[in-house]
Image (spheres, rainbow, N blue to C red):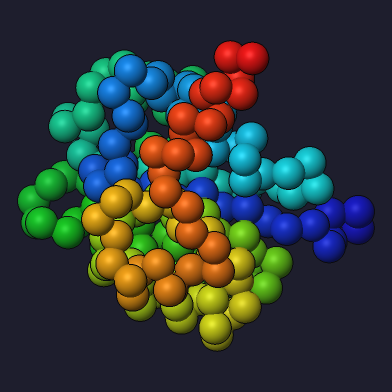
Amino acid sequence: MENEHKNLVGIFWDIENIRIPKGTSTIDTIEAIRKRFCSDGEIELEFQVVCDIRKESPAVVQGLNSLQVTVVHIDAISKNAADDKLRQLIRRFGDVHGDRAKIIVLTGDVNFSTDLADLKRRKKCQIILLHNRHATRSLLLSASENYLFEEIVQRGVTNVAE
């Protein structure tokens, strides 16, 4: 029963929209995210990336796998196939865990705003958005908190190096 009141963390990365910054490794990027947003009093249940793995470099996929990130392969047969699958995974996580869910989403895609806003209001999930510079106001407002992805990664990599 010790875990009953801890936040349950799900991290969902739209890697086709939010790329790993040049000069930064996959491992450093993931560690920066985990260090900043997953505290000792929380349980990371999921860290998922949905993409067409044929479009990602083998080094990125290997880095994701080495850090226990679930990589879901979706054939890029339609424009939003990966986004649709990622949104489905986010909705399921929020529906199952409700107000104990801390959902961290890495995207700059406005198409996520409806689902995120709904989970924030209807299920009382904590939504943390890591976005790019092109994120719309409606996407930013759909989250409980939002951060510029590049800044989080730069700070995290600097802290890891110290």
Judged left or right of residue 126, residue 129 is: left
The location of residue 24, given as percent across then percent down, is 38, 21
Q: Residue at x 47, y 33 (%)?
A: 153
The location of residue 101, given as percent across then percent down, is 64, 64
Which image quadrant is residue 22 in?
A: top left
Total number of numbered labels?
0
Q: Is residue 65 visible?
A: no
Toward the viewer: 133 or 57? 133
Indicate the quadrant containing the N terminus: top left, top right, bottom left or bottom right: bottom right
Q: Is residue 128 visible?
A: yes
Up/down of 23 relative to 32, above or below: above
Up/down of 8 relative to 55, above or below: below
Which image quadrant is residue 144 in?
A: bottom right
Toward the viewer: 134 or 50? 134
The location of residue 110, given as percent across then percent down, is 27, 67
Indicate the quadrant containing the C terminus: top left, top right, bottom left or bottom right: top right
Judged left or right of residue 109, residue 142 is: right
Toward the viewer: 10 or 31? 31
Q: Residue at x 47, y 52 (%)?
A: 147
Which image quadrant is residue 124 in?
A: bottom right
Q: Residue at x 39, y 38 (%)?
A: 150
Q: Residue furthest right?
A: 2
